[in-house]
Structures are given as C-alpha cells and as structure tokens.
Amino acid sequence: MKKMITLLLAGMMVFSMAACGGGQKQETSAPATEAAGSEAADTEAAGGEASDQGKVFNIYAWNEEFKGFFEKYYTVPEGVTVNWIINPSDGGVYQQKLDEALLNQENAPADEKIDMFLAEADYIGKYVDSPYTMDVSSFGFTNADTEYEYTIKAASDQSGVCKGVSFQCCPAAVIYRKSIAKDVLGTDVPEEVQAQIDTWEKFDAVAAQAKEKGYYMTASFAETFRAFSNNCTTPWVDADGNLQFDDQITAWMDQTDNYIQNGYTLTAGVWDQEKTDQMYAKGKTMCFFGPAWYYNFCMTNAQDPEEGCPGDWCIVKGPQAYFWGGTWLLAATGSDNTEMLKDIFETFTSNEEVCSNLVEQDNQFPNNTAVVEKYANDPEYGNTAILDGQNDIAIFAELAKDIKWENHTNYDQLLNEGLQNKLQEYYNGSVDKETALKNFYNYVKETYANINVPE
Amino acid sequence: MDGQNQKKTGKQKAVNYAKWGYIFIIPFFVVYIIFTLVPQFLTIYNSFFETYRDGLTQIGPNFVGLDNYRAVFTPDSSGTIRILKYFANTLIMWVAGAVPQFVIAMLLAIFFTSYRLNIKGQGFFKTVIYMPNLIMAAAFSMLFFTLFNRAGPIQAILVQNGMIDQSFDFFAYKITVRGMIALMNFLMWFGNTTIVLMAGIMGIDQSLFESATIDGANSTQVFFKVTLPLLMPIFVYCLITAMIGGIQMFDVPQVLTNGKGVPDELSRTLIMYLNGYLINKNFGMAGAISVIILIITGILGGIVYRMLSAQYKAPKQKRKY
C-alpha cells in the first residue's frame, strides 16, 4: 500500500513537472533562437567574392510565419548564417525588443547588427519614418510594377522614400461554413450568400436567423473589428495628440453590444483558443473574418484531418471591404548584407515561381499582381486545402484593388489591442461599459504619456 | 587579573579577525553598491523627471519636480486613486495566500518535529511540499491559465457535470481570479515556510517540551506557551520576508491574466502597474511608483516588526536564564 502511494505521488510529480515544462517551453521558445548567434561568428565565408558583405544575417520577427517561407523559398548564400530573433508581438514586446536593438545598432559589432526586420501594418510607420530603416534604392532595389500600390506606400516615409517591401497583400473577406450557411440561409453558393450579407444591416439580420437555428454568427466579439477599424476616416490620434474614436470604431462597439446581448457571438478574444475551437467540424459558428494568411495562421483547426472540416468553407466579400495586417520586410540601416537584402526583396516580390508557390502550396496571397492575375483568371485553380475548390484569389484580387493606406498612426497596435482587452471585460459581464472605457483611457495614458485622453 | 588578560588578548584577536572579515565582505558591498544602491538612487532621481520614449525618439529628461508623484495620486475620471486600488489588490491577494500558508506551514512544522508523532519518510514529504517552489512562477501560472480558461479542462468537466453554465468564466469574477492567485502563492510558498519554521522549532531545546508535558501541559498549551514564544524571532523573519515578497507580487498575476489584471484591474498588483509604464520606458512615472512602493514596504515592515517584537522580547529575557 505504502509503495503504491509512493509510486502514485512520484508519478504525479513527474507528470506535473512535465506538464509545466511544456508550458514553460512555449513561453521561452522565442529567445532560444538567440543562442544561435554566438556560434555564428565562427562560420567561414565562402571564398572572397563578396568580401564587403557580412557573414551573419540577423532578422527580427514576432512569429515563425515568414521564417517558414524564407527557409522554404530563399537559398541563403554559402557561408552566411541567418539568425532569427523572435519575440512575441503581444503587449508590444516585439516592438520593445526591436527598439532596443535598433537604438543600439550603431554601436553593435557588424555581425550583431540587425539586417532586416519585420513590421506589421499597425506600427510600420514608426520605423519607416525613422533613420533606422534604409532607402531600398541605396542597395539597388527598385520596386516592381507588380507590387500593390498600398504596400509600397506603407513602407515609404513621408517624403516617399521606400524602406522595404511586403511579401503579401492582405485584402480580407468573410470565410463561412458552407454546411451552416445551407442550414441558416438555405444556400451555400457564394454569390447567393454574399447577396444576403452585403450590408451590415443584412449581416445583423442573418445573425438573428443563425441564432434561431442554434448557431453563432461570429466566434469572437472582436471578429469584425478589423472590417470596421481599417475603414476609419480619422486616425486614432489627431494632430494635437488627442485620442479620438472614429465613427467606424463606434459602429463596431454598437454592433458588438448587440451581438453579445443577443448571443450572436462569443466573448472570446480574436486569438483565443475558445474561438479557434469553433473551427472544428463540431463548431457552431458560421462566419470568420480574415485575409489569406488567416487560413494557415488561425484556421489550422479547420484543416485538421480528423476533427476539422476542410472543404466546408467558402469565401465572399461580406458587408464591407477591408484589409488586415500584412508583414513588411524592412531594411535596417547599418546592414552589411545589402546584396542579400536586395535578393530577398526580389525573391518575395518579383520571383514569379516563388509567388506562384506561395499561392499553390501555402494558400497565400502574394504581393505580385501578375501572379495574382494568372490565378484569378485560371479556371483550373481552386483552393482545396480549406475551401471547396473555390478560386479565392479571384475574390481577393478584386478586393485588393480598393485597399488604401491612410489614417494610420504609430500607436495602432497597442491601442487596438488595449481597446479590445478592456472591452472584453465589458462583454463578458465583469464591468459596465463606462468602466471599461475608463480603464482603456487609463491604459492609454500609462502606455503613451504623450497622448491626451478624455477626462 | 587573569580575566582581564584574557579579555585583552581576546580583543586583539577580534580586531585582527575583523579586518579579514571586512575584506571578505568587500565583494558583496561592491556588488551591492553598483547593482542595488546606485540604481536605487537613480530611481529616486529619475522620479523627478519627465523621461519616456515616443516611438524611437527619447523625450526628456526634463525636470518636473513632484509632478510625477502628483500624477500618481491624481484620481481618474471615476474618482479612484489607482495606486491605492492596486495596493489594496496586492494586500488582499497576499493576505488570502499568506494566512493559509502560515497556518498550514505551522501545523506541518509541528507534526514533523513532534517526537510523539515521529512521522516516517520525512525526507520524502519535505521534498514534495517544497516541490512547487522549484517550478518557475510563470510556468505555474501558465498551468493554471491552461486549466481554468474557458477552453480548458476544468471548465469542460464542470459543465459536463452540470455544475456551471457554459458561459461561466473563471476570469470574469474577482473572487475566482484573486482566489487562484492566492492559491498559487500559497502552494508555492507553504513548503518553504514549513522548512524554515521546522528549523526554528528544532532549535528549541527538546527538554523544554518534555518538562512542560511532565508539568501537565496539554499539546495546545505546549504550543502556545512554549513553542510559539520561542519561535517568534523566526516567525517574524518569515512574516516580513513573505510580506516583502507579497508587495512585489508580479509574475503570477501577470502571466495568469496576461498582464491585464482582469476583472476591472482588480487583480492588478503594484508591480504590474509599475510595469505598465515601462512599455515606453517612462522612467519618470515608474520611478515615482517605485519610491512609493519602497516607502510602503518600509512602513509595513516597521509595523509588523513593532507589533510582534514586543511579544518575543519577553521570552528572550527568559532564555537568558
């Protein structure tokens, strides 16, 4: 008996330590890549052909998404070691770490200088409008005609000097479950579904219908946030540094109030597991909002061969055209690997083979209009990884034409994130709306001392 | 005569040794001054300046006098002075964890040291109760988050048994969130306290317990009249270190609530507040808050020491005999 208890306790200990070890790993996996840096200096360069070029290429990123594509499609010149320094984006951690490294760039040894870093739409301006990014023409890169206009504008400073490229274009749409649409609307044909949700009023009406049948319209209170926020006509912060709510943000809050009260949506955040669990076949949610990167980044549950439901999805424009996110590759001032920078930029924007592979193998929407046109007009092409073989590129291509780059501030990431975090507490019932907004203002004041908030 | 001589040589020796003693503690003081004392003064210095970063641009430092302190104590739109709210949160969560921590630790320490119980396999149990302290607080917190979030197993089990509704959210109520934080702190620290208290009890002469028993004292009387008074110095030490740790509570609530301090910032601690200002390197405000925390810690430490030291001074005199 005693032995049994001892064994049991020992087993529990081992199990609990293993379980915690798992959690811990997840958290610390980011800095682990840094360790590779120390060995990098030992690597020999291949011959003397590129003598003025560095042997170590340092890339700052906030997740593994681009790393995957980079390793798949880009052949690193012989003798060059690539270091990935990955920090999570949540709570502004990535920006903090990147800022520290950039401010120290001048004093860093050549092999530790950042060569390239990734930036998101929500804060790209902060880096583009600074001396820490480099004019792409300084190392002979010229933007191709096939790049989407807005991606160039986003990567250019106020005087129009371009500092980098985007490897993707991010028009976003509504991705719906066919089986649920069939049950709710009586049809799962994209054109007919689109006709029933092409305005927010109609979308709300369908949400009520879905509710009656026992479904959710969306799986997160913030699911529609980007559809509104990326159509704002005023920036988050005005010229005098005052925080302001755009009508689109207010409209989103009103819609979400309605959805939460009526049970059309869940109180989960946009990245929460509770939401992504809804993408399994057993899920009860009809619509998700996202661009092409959403498939692989957020919809892995839907692609699960056993519990998922690949092929049960279709894509339509939805009530309002918008874009969401995007990953820009920016050239860091002080990089000693300019030839490689040029090479990488070209690979991911004008290399048609790579861009085609991004579409066919990775379900991406590349930043190359020629390749996009090719697939949009190809009757043979269809997305079968998630969708039912529908030509999603044709829909995204149409939406991409309308994307405009305006009304962005350097503060967007933490303001969008903070607003959602504080309002989530209102939507799950722990505080009233007034308190939630007050907490948001306090958060803004705390995070950005230079932004004035309403008293 | 003889005694005087002895005293003299003794003194000389002590002086010699003291010199070496001072030399040996130099490294500690050098490290302490460079890495603790100087930053401490810099923090105080910074608290009088406006200094933060807007994007990649450094703003300041501009001397602003006591403006940062004024800002800390300015009520927000609903009339709450936020630092007081966070202080109350910290205190409530610490007390909720520390009370069971000390009660259980005391009980276990008594059990383990009792010659009457004479528990077998003590080494094993001591290791097990100390175990949670070995796990990184952040990992422990992450584990609780994974267990209790709405997509987690606890929710699923309770819903299946019909004990809660699907819409129930452990993170929407202050009682559950604070409870989880207190529980984690309790689990992590009761083992440590047990070990220290045991060491304290074992330092007490066993014959005192025996004679008390022979005199007819029952276990309760032995505990309150013999063990507790003699244990007071160690107990006060434990309590003050635990309290300082409690005021600096950060990693458990930070990781559990992902830095949000849900709900309504009622699980946000003083250090989480401080950390909020560090996102954009706002060293002015962060400095002011640090200084206030330092003062609070000093005051609370003083109060606890005063209150309890009165009780343990008496037995100290007794012990002399």
Image: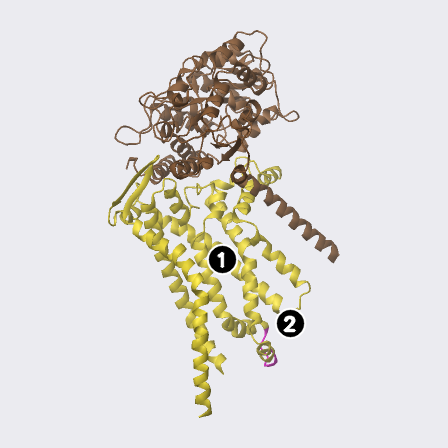
Which residue, given by chain and number where applicable, does mark 2 sit on?
B115
The chain letter of the brown chain reads A
Is B179 left or right of A231, judged from the image as shown?
Answer: right
Which residue, given by chain and number where applicable, does mark 1 sit on?
B98
Residue at mark 2: chain = B
> How dense is the environment of label 2, judged by Cα within 10 Å: few (below 14), some, or many (20 and up)?
few
Q: Position of residue A329 (x, y in %)?
A: 45, 25
Q: Position of residue B244 (x, y in %)?
A: 43, 57
Which element carries disc 1, helix, strand or loop?
helix
Q: Which residues fall within the magenta stretch?
A: B213-218
Q: Is residue B244 above or below residue A338?
A: below
Dominant secondary structure of the magenta stretch?
A: loop
Q: Is residue B229 above or below residue B1?
A: above
Using the rendered image of the protein, determine whether residue A129 is visible from the camera's viewpoint: yes
Q: Position of residue B320 (x, y in %)?
A: 48, 81
Is B284 left or right of B126, judged from the image as shown?
Answer: left
Residue at screen point 47% across, 62% down = B239
Residue at mark 1: chain = B
Disc on the earlier residue, 2 or 1: 1
Q: Is residue A262 above or below residue B24?
A: above
Which color is chain B depicted in? yellow
